Image (spheres, rainbow, N blue to C red):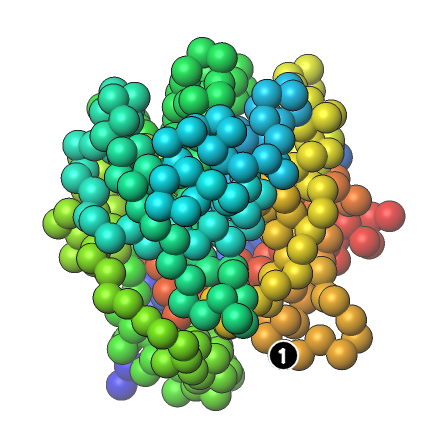
Amino acid sequence: MTKAPAKTNIFGDTSPGFESVRDLFTKNMNQWEEEHAQLCVYHRGQKVVDLWGSKGDTGQFTPDSLINIFSSGKSLEALAIAHLAGAGQLDYDAPIARYWPEFAAQGKDAVTVADLMRHEAGLANFDVSLETEDLLTHRIKENAIGKYIEEHSQHFKDRARTAREYHALTRGWIANELFRRVDPQGRTIGEFVQQEISQPLQLDLAIGVTEEQYERRVPITPLHPLKHLLATFRPKLFGRRVLHNTFQLFARLFMLIKTLFRGPSKKWPTPIQGMTGIGFFNDKNLAMGETPSANTSASARALAKVAAGMAAGGMFEDHTILSKEAWDLLHTDPVHATMGGFLPCAFTQGGVAHYALSSSNSNWLQRAFNQGREGFYGWMGLGGSLFQWHPQHEIGFAFVPTSLHMLDLMNERGKCYQEEVLRCVSNLN
């Protein structure tokens, strides 16, 4: 007999009209393979959902605990670049080499800022493994990473089909080099986020943690793919502990597997020396460095507050997160393309995704990615996190789990909460 999942302790509250979000969070946290998670939502500048759950709670997991949000942090690096664009210090259509002349080496002279932010720079992987210590802020300023990028050539897996290939870690490293060269103070993205966003708004949010912040960082735990697969065989009626059934999961994986065998490929080294798996991102030395695309540490409360400001045009209460000019530029010109021949998505010139169904004839993959989160901007993190905003309905949304469901390729587990929040907001209007 299969052992029943341990009961999860649920904390926090919801505003009137959003009680069903708590009900859904409680149900999912108790049924699914979860350990700890935070869910926070703002509507029209007010916090309407503030929930967190923990199995076998010991009091160590709180709504202010820091968790690695992986690629959800890409939206923060996008905000940093947009800040420069809004100040007239950077042009998305300009070649990166205008601001960083050495970048032009090896034929990269025509790569624009927008190309980078849309994952179309041809630099999705590096041919060298970076050293962890080179990710520290002072080493970045010594050009420890920049020197590799300068001498790197482009590589496209199948440019005839698409130039868009997910720059999972590299977009943040390149954007950081660009940012520090253009920023009048010579700051890194981590320093910018700390000084311009985290400190003024008193947020638990950092790209590169301090010693004290690391002590409040809760490790992530990947759900083993085999365990995830086996869980899909149980019917939902009998308490399936993951979102998708076997057929749904294989349909999603089939598209990815087919893509991996299409077009020329190249064997790349691990992005960071010593990296043997996702658990490597729990390492203290890595957490203290700046990998903006993959090691932002944050709470859902912090992310939701930033998202609330973005949903309101760049302002949270009396603090400007982004100027109107920067906000407009960030959201301009969403271009549809297929990421790596697998994932259909629309990225703005500023590098955030815009979620919307392209037509009534959208296929199941487009529906899986967009349906239930139409109108949101932002991105998502490996295994589950979501950091997104909805300007039309003024929703700031953040979901941050510690259990990573890496086979949930489009973070549909968190999308359940977005869908419910949209339903609640619709009922209030």
* 386 versus 83 height, above or below: below
Q: Whole-percent x and y of residue 154?
A: 39, 53
Amino acid type of disc 1?
Trp
* 175 versus 33 height, above or below: above
Q: Quadrant of the N terminus?
A: bottom left
Task: Say whether residue 80 is left or right of residue 92.
Answer: left
- Residue ranking furthest to the right: 429
What is the tally of numbered marks visible in this picture? 1
Given residues 225 and 253, the one toward you in this image is 253
Q: Whole-percent x and y of residue 237?
A: 51, 83
Q: Whole-percent x and y of residue 371?
A: 67, 66
Q: Whole-percent x and y of residue 243?
A: 48, 72
Task: Say whether residue 16 is left or right of residue 384.
Answer: right
* 137 versus 119 height, above or below: above
Q: Residue at x 51, y 29 (%)?
A: 98
User: Can residue 426 be seen in the rendering of this structure?
Assistant: yes
Per the image, the residue denoted by label 1 is 364
Badge 1 marks a residue whose secondary structure is helix
Q: Quadrant of residue 298?
A: top left
Within-10-Å neighbours for mark 1: few <14, some 14–19, many 20+:
few
- Residue ranking furthest to the left: 274
Q: Residue at x 36, y 74 (%)?
A: 264
Q: Quadrant of residue 208?
A: top left
Q: Residue at x 37, y 80 (%)?
A: 261
User: Can residue 212 be seen in the rendering of this structure?
Assistant: no
Given residues 371 and 96, the one toward you in this image is 96
Given residues 200 and 169, the one toward you in this image is 169
